[in-house]
Amino acid sequence: MIINIARRAHDHNWELDPIVRSLLDTDFYKLLMLQFIWKHFPRTRATFAVQNRSVQVRLADIIDLHGLCDQLEHARQLRFHKSEMIWLAGNTFFGKRGMFEPAFLEWLEKDFRLSDYEVAVENGQVSLRFEGLWTETTMWEIYALAIIDELKTRAALKPLSEFELDVLYARAKTRLWEKMVRLRGVPGLSLSDFGTRRRHSFLWQEYVVLAMRDVLGESFTGSSNTYLAYKHDLEAMGTNAHELPMAVAALANTDEELKRAQYRLLELWQQTYAGELLILLPDTFGTTQFLRNAPEWVADWTGQRIDSKDPFVAGDEYIAWLEQRGRDPRRKRLIASDALDVDKILALHAHFAGRILDGTDPWDFRTAADFKDAQRWTPERRIRFSSGWGTFLTNDFRNCNPHGDKSFDPISLVCKLVEVDGRPAAKLSDNYAKSMGPAEEVERYRRVFGTEGQINVPVEA
Amino acid sequence: MIINIARRAHDHNWELDPIVRSLLDTDFYKLLMLQFIWKHFPRTRATFAVQNRSVQVRLADIIDLHGLCDQLEHARQLRFHKSEMIWLAGNTFFGKRGMFEPAFLEWLEKDFRLSDYEVAVENGQVSLRFEGLWTETTMWEIYALAIIDELKTRAALKPLSEFELDVLYARAKTRLWEKMVRLRGVPGLSLSDFGTRRRHSFLWQEYVVLAMRDVLGESFTGSSNTYLAYKHDLEAMGTNAHELPMAVAALANTDEELKRAQYRLLELWQQTYAGELLILLPDTFGTTQFLRNAPEWVADWTGQRIDSKDPFVAGDEYIAWLEQRGRDPRRKRLIASDALDVDKILALHAHFAGRILDGTDPWDFRTAADFKDAQRWTPERRIRFSSGWGTFLTNDFRNCNPHGDKSFDPISLVCKLVEVDGRPAAKLSDNYAKSMGPAEEVERYRRVFGTEGQINVPVEA
């Protein structure tokens, strides 16, 4: 066998194995939000900060800060490729052509920049902040999370021998396959990859996504990762995130404006997007108050994404609300996206995607066969349910490490909006443990929005 | 990334992906026996035939006969490389230099040839026969088995997608690792690879052997595969096989000569080899009669390999026989090599390699921790026990196939001596199901040797 000597020599010359290699390697909702911000808030400044909610994992002891800066610098020097721009302009997203305006795409190609960053160490954690125009900072979220996740992965890979590395991935692949097999053939199942922010690595996410497509066929509806959608002809998934209502709320001058901010954001969003992009994310300041106080037109939106609330409770609450407002839930979409794994995906699917609620425990649905055996499955669905599968899809290496330690276990890493035009941003969510912002702001928000329906449970990765 | 275009073009040009690529890719005992045959039986003719004892697997429906002939032809055109010859001459085997005579090595390099072969189909099975001088036919055994095994594997691989192939090997690697982990750290454990004849493929055997070396360290004593020993600086393991006593027996002119043949073979063997190569294989015509009638000097041999008898029974029988003959079992070696897997390896090690036999069930020893917790472990070993691990080391793909069928399950394929200088060869073994030869010969052998201690149990792969 003739060795490729040039390749080998090039490998010796490597200065960096970049983690983020394309600006498309981000969640699609960031691009939708970027266009929205570019349009409605082009002069607004916004600060984002990375926070590791898994405080027991001392990231600063694990990750080399020079390596982190090299990766961030590499991401900052990336530009959109011509072919990527042409794809963004010409591709159909959610069945719609021309999702991005020509003026936005021109700005994206010529003027888009990532802001500067500040790296420091605090209490064993990596403190990473991005300050600048909102259009310059918002995109850092996913790049920063993916970079830190993968640097943590690389640190955990380092002590393993070549054979142990092989076993690590063999185990993870075996686990992935067992999951796919349980999901394969479940009638009406709808799943997508939401795992960019928590992925083990880019290559592993790509492997997982291609496996999903191969094994699950039509049940796999796409990936939130825009680069993978571009590279592999998948649907790009995602709509919007908490940073939007958080920013509008932070900019409010009075408590009354604050209370209206969550709907004001929706008004702005529907000036830009329609159809499948009109997905409510009602938990930013508490779902129950959001639904109760919502103007009538909010019930016309296409669906809801559940994030921080128990999805069974939140979905039932949404359906009851729709019925109360005279809307047909069967025409609506419900997306769960928090801490999902196979058991919960199947149970939620059983509960929402067509089961008659006759007291059958949705957690009894554990394999495709359980759905096929079920007599009471109704052809018309109660609601168009789909799962946005994250951490446990793209980073489930629990008990896969041949060294037996937990160094590959995912951590709950977030990159959140902390300041907008000098004012603090805050979030309540439906889970006390996920509230964010300075204590006095969280206090004020709780006073303004109330705390009905919010609970206090630990955060899963 | 620059593609190696020449390599890709070469791949298009491939005519054959050879299974056996070196004449060293055989069990080491074949080379020891070849030298023995070359020395003592240079003019003897011997016919070998492949037999699939797993008759439910219709090999002729699975394997393409043209492909089989291409592979056999490729093996027949191989010659020993200079570097391989130098290694055979200069390497230490079982601590001894110069295991192979210069005259033999000269013959091996210049005059060694593999015989012609006959391929046919009979009752859905591949009939493969090798006729010629014993020195030309004996080496076919391992090449033929490895070729048929791997052709069967390739046929099973064909319907799998790239992702399914990846899952197949991920599962097999995961399984292998679980086995290694159970064996790692067991005090005094001694294991070697005996899996060439039943391997999934050459590359898988190589993977397994390197994994064993990496994970088990000193407990892994070597491989029966001479090429792997050569390539990876391992000890080459193995001594002799049934074909030797079978041939000497077939050449016997009287019942009395037949009965003495099993010891006559030993006399010849010890003219050529000594020390660790003096390993009895007493089950060819029944172990119990072999031991009872053995001349006194047989008890001076270094050890025994158990093949067709329950190894607990056979080992105890050997130890009792040694004590009865006034030999110290602690100075002897006991090798088990039939249908071993982790449970049995650990139980046998617990039973033979040092446990006081106080009624503790050896099958209770299931992990390294069980051995460390045991108080009654004695520092002086009862007997130097080691396991020659075959099929379930190099071909354990049970339940690994993503398609769910059993097409990767190993089969009990053998290539046995059937005729010597025109006379039928036969074997009784300690297991009726493993007896071989024409019915009337088996009948005669049973009359001559008796059947004491022989049983009738199904053959495991």
Image (tube, coloured by chain):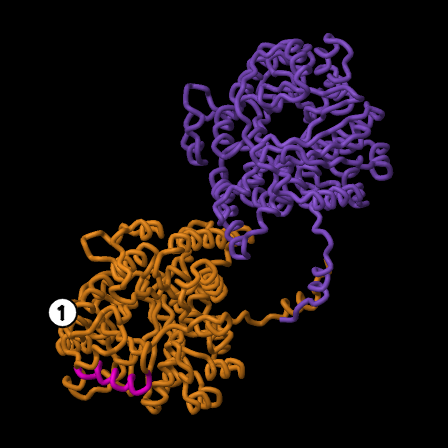
Chain colours: A purple, B orange
Task: Measuring from the top left, give residue B153's x and y in whole percent.
Answer: 45, 62
**Membership of B260 in magenta stretch:** yes
Q: Residue at x 33, y 61 (%)?
A: B461
Image height check: is B444 above or below A63? below
In which quadrant is the C terminus of chain A drawn? top right
Majority secondary structure of magenta residues: helix
Q: Chain of mark 1?
A: B
| Horizontal side of residue B101 vs B297, given as left or right | right
Q: Residue at x 81, y 25 (%)?
A: A45
Image height check: is A399 above or below B450? above
The front one of B372 and A197 is B372
Task: Measuring from the top left, give residue B329's x and y in whole percent.
Answer: 22, 69
Image height check: is A360 above or below B285? above
Q: Residue at x 26, y 75 (%)?
A: B280
| Horizontal side of residue A444 vs A103, given as left or right | left
Tell me the residue that label 1 is attached to: B452
Helix, strand or loop at mark 1: loop
In which quadrant is the N terminus of chain A drawn? bottom right
| Horizontal side of residue B43 vs A365, given as left or right | left
Q: Where on the picture, by quarter, is residue B239? A: bottom left
**Membership of A414 in magenta stretch:** no
Q: Residue at x 54, y 31 (%)?
A: A340
Amino acid at pointer 1? Glu
Can the viewer see residue A162? yes
Q: Which residues are magenta?
A: B259-273
Task: Measuring from the top left, give residue A310's x and y in whole percent.
Answer: 53, 22
Q: Where on the picture, by quarter, is residue A88? A: top right
Task: Measuring from the top left, give residue B327's x and y in whole percent.
Answer: 19, 74
| Horizontal side of residue B84 vs B357, given as left or right | right
Total labels: the figure holds 1
Q: Residues within 10 Å of mark 1 (few under 14, many from 20)?
A: few
